[in-house]
Each structure stands twice: as C-alpha cells, then as structure tokens.
Image (cartoon, grey):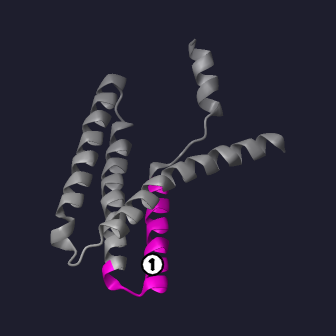
Amino acid sequence: MTPDQAAAWRANQPKVDVWKVVAWQAGAGMLLAAAVAVVSGQWRLVSSVAWGVVAVVLPSAVFARAWARQMRLVQAGAALAGLFVWELVKILLTVMLLVASPWVISQLSWLALLAGFVVTMKVSWVVMALGWWRRRTRERI
C-alpha cells in the first residue's frame, strides 16, 4: 500500500476505544451476574460468574492501560514489541486468576465461572460489530 492508500484505509476503519470495550465487558458481566442472582438465588453461582467476569475484565483493563501508553511511543517497532509483552502479561494474569479460583470462591461452580468468562470475553466482538454497524448505517444516510 502507498501511504495515501493506508491513510484512506485507516479513515474507513471504525475507531474502537479500548476503555469502552472494558466498560462493556464489565457491564455485560454485571448483568449476567444479576440475572444469575435473580434466576438461581444461589450465592455460589453468582460469585462464580462474577469471578469469571473478573478473570476477563481485570486483565483487559491492565492491557488497555498498557495499550494507551504504547500508542504514545514514536517508534512503531518498540510499540509493537511492548504490545506483545503486555498481551503475554494479560494471558498470564488471566491464567493466574483462573488457577486461583478454587481458593478465592468457596463452592466454586466451574460451569458458572466459564459462563461468566465466555460471555464477558465475547462482548468485545459485539462492541466491534456495533461500531461496524454504526459506520455502515451512517454511510447509507
């Protein structure tokens, strides 16, 4: 691509704020935990879902902070290398939180934890799809 083509491509791509994604993840996780509380009324299920949400949101917030710092770097190579390092930190933190689950949550329900984890993680796709959909509807108007 030429620099002009790259600039045109970038202009057409939806801008996604990483903090917005983290906020949507936290919101979706809280809604899921509230729904589990209403439907089941069991604290062990609610706490398991909530821990699954924490295992996604906390590492995402750490990565979002690192992303904001890395994007300020002038050298693209250093920024990219830093993002790889922070992605590794995010993965390790997620694994550590999941491994610690039985010690943090008494009477842990792995299924509920997995539900909270997966639903919260998939919200990032919903946020990106909404950005794409909003851009498409603006182009049609």
- Reply yes or no: does residue 25 show up in magenta: yes
Residue 42 vs residue 15, the one in the foreground: 42
Pick the front one: 5 or 48 = 48
Could you say which is closer to the camera, residue 124 or residue 138? Answer: 124
Residue 45 occupies quadrant: bottom left
The majority secondary structure of the magenta stretch comes to helix
- Asked if the magenta segment contains residue 71, the reply would be no
Is residue 141 found left or right of 5 in the rendered image?
A: right
Residue located 78% across and 40% down the image: 139
Secondary structure, mark 1, is: helix
Residue 13 pos. (x, y %) = 61, 35
Residue 106, compared with residue 80, is above or below; it is below
Is 44 located above or below residue 93 in the figure? below
* Residue under the image location 49 percent in, 78 percent down: 35
Q: Tell me the amino acid under the disc marked 1.
A: Val
Identify which residue, 14 or 29, lies in the foreground. 29
Q: Within 10 Å of the Cα at label 1, are there few (<14), some (14-19), or many (20+) other Cα atoms?
A: many
Residue 58: % across, % down? 31, 59
Q: Is residue 15 above or below residue 58?
A: above
User: Residue lying furthest left in this view?
Assistant: 103
Residue receiving disc 1: 36
Q: Position of residue 83 (x, y in %)?
A: 32, 36
On screen, 108 above or below 128? below
Q: Is residue 119 left or right of residue 46?
A: right
> In terms of image quadrants, where is residue 136?
top right
Report the residue that reaches farthest toward the top.
Answer: 2
Magenta part of the chain: 19-44
Where is residue 109, by image quadrant? bottom left
